[in-house]
Image (spheres, helix red, strand yellow):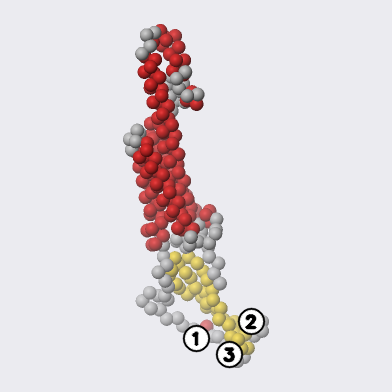
Amino acid sequence: SCEFDFNKMPFDTQMCGVRLQMMSPSGMATFNTEEVTFEKDADGYGGTKAWTFSIFDTASGATSDQRSYIDFGFQLERIPDYWVTFTIAPSVMLVAMSYGTFWIQRTAMPARATFAFICYLTTISLTNGALAVLPKVSSRNVLLLNILTLGQFFCAFTVFSIVVANYLLHIEVRLTAAWAEARKQENYQKLKESGEAVVFIGARIAKLDHYIVNKRGEMYFSDQHVDVLARWLFPVAYALAVAIVVGTALE
């Protein structure tokens, strides 16, 4: 029998066993492990495109009703090339591509949003492809799914960051327009000296914008700050998260 452990997939090794048992009593026929030999070919004991196969143990004995048996213990080691090439590597590249949106011009929001959203949808497609060939197990127990989930999270973070940056850009545009209108007022200098200019500005921006704009009519946090912060935080956080996930699974 084989009780598969997917914790290290696609770098996992599974231990399995097979029992051959005589249907006649032991007195008539018995298994002898000393007479059992295994022949290797150029590829060892054989295997498939996805697994390598090796035998690590044999044992013989008799059941309670005196029927002779022999147990074979064998090892299946997964060949990770397929999963690394067509699942893990594309996931990492998609995260890197979504990170690249933070370096695109701030005003090109439609292009940035489209690019990031495509990356996010593609990571979901990769995850669905992996889930299709796995039993329904918790992703916390599968290295492959953990890496793909990280890819989804960071691509989703990119989309969210672009949404926030776009909102802040709109506030900046409204604020700039309000200040431009204030400067056109004949009594602008008087308004500025008395502090009424900020009241003038505040009346021309949305209510929600007031949480971002300080008493001097300036933004606490702009879309440019989002990009600068993400350019440093994003790659460090992703590399650290992948290192923790891989290190935990392979320890």
Of marks 3 and 2, which one's residue comes earlier in the chain? 3
| 3D distance between C-alphas at marks 3 and 2 | 13 Å
The image quarter in which residue 48 lies: bottom left
* Residue to which mark 2 is pinned: 63
Report x, y in % for residue 46.
42, 75
Answer yes or no: is residue 239 visible: no
SS for callout 3:
loop
Residue drawn at the location 38% of the way across and 11% of the way down = 185
Residue drawn at the location 53% of the way across and 62% of the way down = 135
Q: Amino acid at mark 3?
A: Ala
Q: Residues within 10 Å of mark 2 (few under 14, many from 20)?
A: few
Q: Residues within 10 Å of mark 1 (few under 14, many from 20)?
A: few
* Residue to which mark 3 is pinned: 29
Answer yes or no: is residue 46 visible: yes
Q: Nearer the viewer, mark 3 or mark 1?
A: 3
Of marks 2 and 1, which one's residue comes earlier in the chain? 1
Do the residues under discs 3 and 2 have CB atoms within 8 angstroms? no
| 3D distance between C-alphas at marks 2 and 1 | 20 Å
Q: Amino acid at mark 1?
A: Glu
SS for callout 2:
loop
Q: Where 90 sits versus 227, above or below? A: below
- Residue at the outermost right position: 64
Q: Amino acid at mark 2?
A: Thr
Q: Residues within 10 Å of mark 3 (few under 14, many from 20)?
A: few
SS for callout 1:
helix
Residue drawn at the location 62% of the way across and 91% of the way down = 27
The image quarter in which residue 163 lies: top left
* Residue to which mark 1 is pinned: 35
